[in-house]
Amino acid sequence: MPDQSTPEAPATEATPGETPAVNGIHGRPENSPHGSRPGAFSRRRLLGTAGATGLALGAAGGAAGYAAASGSERSTPLTSLGADTVMFHGKHQPGITTPLQARGHLVAFDLAAGAGRKEAAALLRRWSRTARRLMAGEAAPHDDTDVARDSGPASLTVTFGFGHGFFARTGLEKQRPVALDPLPDFSSDRLDKARSNGDLWVQIGANDSLVAFHALRALQKDAGGAARVRWQMNGFNRTPGATAQQGLTARNLMGQVDGTRNPKPSEPDFDRRIFVPASGDPAWMANGSYAVVRRIRMLLDDWERLSGKAQEDVIGRRKSDGAPLTGGTETTEPELERTGADGKLVIPLNAHARITRPDQNGGAAMLRRPFSFHDGFDTDGVPDAGLLFICWQADPLRGFVPVQRKLDRGDALSAFIRHESSGLFAVPGGAAEGEYVGQRLLEG
């Protein structure tokens, strides 16, 4: 789990009928097609007001509690969280630089027997239409389940990618990128092939669980007879607004600040590191990116037996605030050569933060955008929990692979994690108005 930070979202302009954009996310119009039905309880009516509880608002504007309102009352929502929207059309697909969302679903599909390029194009056309509508807070184009009728779009994003096998199935082998060659084997891998790879990959993120599930169900129904689910995984993050201080780097299930050194869109070389250039090869991948997806099991029982000091030595950072063990704040550069009174390095040689530093890996960089997961307990009561690791880069052979090879050779964290599934997907650039995702590949 390389030591990188949460991305910032690029700003976008509000369209007519929307509230101004905040962090690249728009407020949803009051007359959204997903507004409440007469006689139905809406989020607005259920939330009530802060005054109804006598509880104060936190610094972030979130409420400490809520009270149900009677059917005749009209009240103001305590938060605009559900009203936030992310644009479907754009230079890049959504869900890459979008801020971390509270709920996520990852799902891979294999094309059905007999399905080829024509069927794949029709599927991506359906999926793009559905994603655009749901991200705008509208109902699915057909057979909507009404699961999210009373919810707003809640920053929903849907992202589509192609796996290595997709190109042979569609007769497009000549268009398969070299960067999509299978990842090498790593010594820490314990991969389940049934939960790895896939012809097509979909990433769904939202700040509301019902909204995320609604999108998952709609897209699975859209697949029809063209594709079948190969595997599906569910994840979560801290809910935006749950802390008084905004912009804090998220924590993983080990309790560690996770993602301190992520590249940021404000950095001059961000696009070069994360996105395929407009002049890139193949042409259909212009402004796209490559996603490495890994289900990483955390051996939490073993981890939690360590003392706090031992945990910090494994990571190379303070658990309390993510600062390097050599001092400062989370963003302070670690002093890798500093020794303590005992003459030993303050940041151990095998500390995770030392091994994953870009300047220790030829400048290799990737944008980490993970979800945590917990899928219950095994028969011995051991939690099946960890990280749905997702990282984005312009070229995985220069991003993910060199860092993972180095981690393989002696990362102290390796004793407490297990890589259980893996996938690599080519994620094309965003669809322009009137286009569907992947159109330049499938109709080029």
Image (cartoon, rainbow, N blue to C red):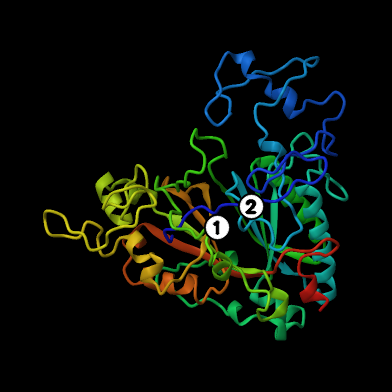
* Residue at (12% x, 53% y) in the render: 341
Q: Residue at x 74, y 45 (%)?
A: 214
Q: Is residue 159 left or right of residue 365?
A: right
Amino acid type for the residue under numbered disc 2: His
- Of residues 211 and 186, the one drawn nearer to the viewer in this rendering: 211
Question: Mark 1 or mark 2, which has the lower sequence index?
Answer: 2
Tell me where residue 274 appears, x and y as whole percent. 57, 67
Residue 330 coordinates in the image, percent (x, y) = 38, 49
Which element is circle 2 on? strand
Judged from the image, the secondary structure of the residue bearing numbered disc 1 is loop
Q: Is residue 287 above or below residue 145?
A: below
Quarter of the C terminus within the rendering: bottom right
Residue 133 pos. (x, y %): 81, 50
Q: Quadrant of residue 194?
A: bottom right
Q: Amino acid at mark 1?
A: Ser
Q: Which residue is mark 2?
A: 105
User: For the residues marked 1 and 2, what is the alpha-carbon distance in whole angstroms?
Assistant: 28 Å
Q: Residue at x 81, y 54 (%)?
A: 130
Task: Please identify the quarter of the rendering in which residue 68 is found.
Answer: top right
Please name the residue that numbered disc 1 is placed on: 266
The foreground one among 433 and 408 is 433
Compare residues 424 and 6 and report the one nearer the observer: 6
Asked if labels 2 and 1 touch by Cβ distance under 8 angstroms, the answer is no
